[in-house]
Image (cartoon, rainbow, N blue to C red):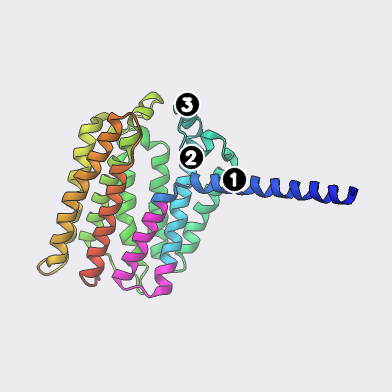
Amino acid sequence: MVLSVARLAGNNQTSGMTRLVLRHGLGLLRASHPEPAVAVTTVTVLLAVGVGHRPAGALAVGAAVLASQLAVGWTNDWLDAGRDAVAGRADKPVATGAVRRDPVGVAGVLAALATPVLALISNATAAACLTAALVSALLYNWPLKRTPLSVLPYMISFAALPAFIVLALPGAPAPPAWLVVAGALLGGGAHFANVLPDLDDDARTGVRGLPHRLGAAGSRLAAMALLLTATLVLVLGPPGPPGWVGWAALATAAVVLPAGWYVSRAAQRRGSRSVGAFRAVMLVAVVDVLLLVLGGRVV
């Protein structure tokens, strides 16, 4: 009987430890900003296939970009832990105590160190390009997100992303200028859309990037203009006349983006936080990549 109780107690202790590990593991995963990380990685793999990577090359490119995305997400939550707690951000696991701050910071450093190592699987030129994109994104986390230059890291990092994918091909061919320009425009639009749900919380905690200075209405207009222009560059940039796929992508962007803004504004009027605009951006990004994949080889 005593032995049975001891075993039961041991089982309960083991079960409790398992639940604790799972809870902290889930918190660490949520702190990585999984939705944009998965979206950007998926877009990367699709574009890698579109520019001519073999499956192994596309997976290597995707792994390096995923590591960079995890590094940016974890570093963001590590840096913003105090600010998120003050703002009452229930969606931030560090702020709610679902995971401790220190492991998130350590995970961010490890992911940042892994990024150039994984990119070197392709070649040194591509690794240097992705490392520059990562450094730019980390500079957004601190200190540029609080300045009028907050849009620049997004534009630089998003411009470097398709450049990295092309440079990762055998022989490291030069990426076409129109592709890099489209990436920069898409990054700028993503910045304005991503900040929209957090404008009020940011204002209370002293963050005043470019979207905060333009306000909600100005940021919506800036995001829409940048994203539509990015799609237009992808339609008209490649050699030859645009086909029906290109015009269909442009029409989709013209419908999806206003719908995302409408959903976000409706949520704001209800007093709730909405990521409708950012999800619209991600959808347009996927449509743009599908445009490239279906439109033929980029290089």
Which residue sits furthest left? 241
Question: Which SS type dominates the magenta stretch?
Answer: helix
* Disc ID at residue 210: none
Q: Position of residue 235 (x, y in %)?
A: 16, 61
Crowding around mark 1 (Cα neighbors within 10 Å: few <14, some 14 to 19, many 20+) is some
Dot 2 or dot 3, earlier in sequence: 2
What residue is disc 3 on? 86
Query: Is 299 left or right of 80, judged from the image as shown?
Result: left
- Magenta includes 5? no
- The amino acid sitting under disc 3 is Val
What residue is disc 2 on? 77
Q: Position of residue 80 (x, y in %)?
A: 47, 35
Q: Are marks 3 and 1 in contact (CB under 8 Å)?
A: no
- The amino acid sitting under disc 2 is Asp
Q: Is residue 135 above or below residue 83?
A: below
Q: From which residue to which does the magenta span run? A: 37-59
- The amino acid sitting under disc 1 is Arg
Query: Is 77 left or right of 247, judged from the image as shown?
Result: right
In which image quadrant can residue 267 be found? top left
Q: CA distance from mark 2 to mark 3?
A: 13 Å
Dot 1 or dot 2, earlier in sequence: 1
Q: Residue at x 25, y 30 (%)?
A: 215
What residue is disc 1 on? 23
